[in-house]
Image: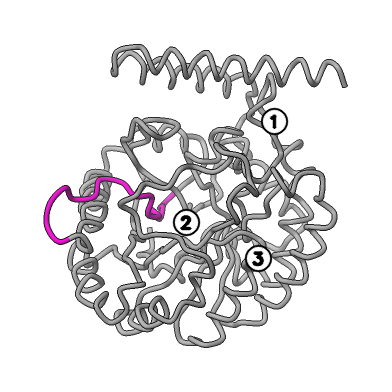
Amino acid sequence: MGRTKKTSVARRGFLKGAAAFVATAPSAVSQNTAAQAAQDWLSLTQEAPLEPELPIIDPHHHLWDDPARTPQRYLLEHLAADTKGHNVRQTVFIECGSMYRADGPEEFRVLGETEFVQGIAAECASGRYGDLRAAAGIVGTADLRLGDRVAPVLEAQVAASRQRFRGIRHGAAWTEPGEIPTGSAAARAPNRPAVVPHLLLDSNFRRGYAHLRTYGLTFEGWVYHTQIAELADLANVFPDTTIVFNHLGGPIGVGAYSGRRDEIFRDWKAAIAELSRCPNVVAKIGGIQMVVNGYGWHERKKPPTSDELLRANRDWYLYTIDQFTPARCMFESNFPVDRLSCSYTVLWNQFKKLTNGFSAGERSAMFHDTAMRVYRLPRH
């Protein structure tokens, strides 16, 4: 126990020291130093990619260049480096408040993100990065609380990337003030559509949400485990709109929820079972290596192996797959957010080990086919 505590303190000290250096160093130097420090830590756990020929679609990652984020930069070159070794054929970009327009009507500024990612997708489609087709699908955002006034924003989003734009995420993950420690969840930029208590039940939000069906758009359901029932209610009221359930419903393991994993798992299972009864909901398997999930991987001297990840995550993954079935599940990376805890290679090795006992068809669904169907991606 003493050794573990000492290791955690050392890891936190390293991160604080790196942060202090970044705060005082010139911008280019600070970015390079922080990125190298993170890479050095990840390299302490090395694994060869398992089943390197298995086709993968990664349906959940972000791209940004933002000094307020960790890492500060995650662009196409970084994604391509992370995916190397696994046969990642295509990816889906998920909104993260990146590169909004600086000018114009407030509700339309979110289009800057789609325009930014459309350019990256076009660059990758040139073949410069091999067989990878990054951002073959794009999920942007819009403030659905605009109600009927959101319709022209949705039209403009689709127009900004007609061949790739697939859906909207208006995040709803919210907790009471003080329930989770500061820093356990990324601060939300003030220009992103606001998260308010019980957002998914809000009448204005639902008037805006009703327009998704008109444009054939999916909705990314990003909530914490305490809000899964509200997402199920939304799915039942709007059965013709596909909801993609993000990050297993964000089971919280820090702050007021620390040390209550068994209780949380029990309540979470009941909520998952209810949500899975909604045929218009599909589930992303992954996205629980964030600080808010409470595993503390980022505080260790060395990052976890795929076996360690699997031991920690297996029950959550298998229960979700059992309830939704492989045909309604897709593995996700949530990079670079989950990169704070483990490498891309280790993360996907975990998924491959998890599914050793599944049939070839079931594995193909979860690694590739479900994402291709839900996001209407071209065969590649």
Residues under labels 2 and 1: Cα distance? Answer: 23 Å
339 shown above or below 244: above
Q: What's the amino acid at mark 2?
A: Pro
Q: Which stretch did the figure color magenta?
A: 89-105
Q: Residues within 10 Å of mark 3 (few under 14, many from 20)?
A: some
Q: Is residue 265 left or right of residue 192?
A: right
Circle on res. 304: 1
Q: Nearer the viewer, residue 23 or 354?
A: 23
For label 2, the residue is 59
Q: Is residue 284 left or right of residue 83?
A: right
Image coordinates for residue 284, horizontal then vertical, percent: 57, 60
Image quarter in which the N terminus is found? top right
| Outermost residue to the right | 1
Image quarter in which the C terminus is found? bottom left
Q: What secondary structure is marked by label 1? A: loop
338 shown above or below 93: above
Q: Is residue 181 left or right of residue 191?
A: right
Mark toward the start of the polypeptide (3 vs 1): 1
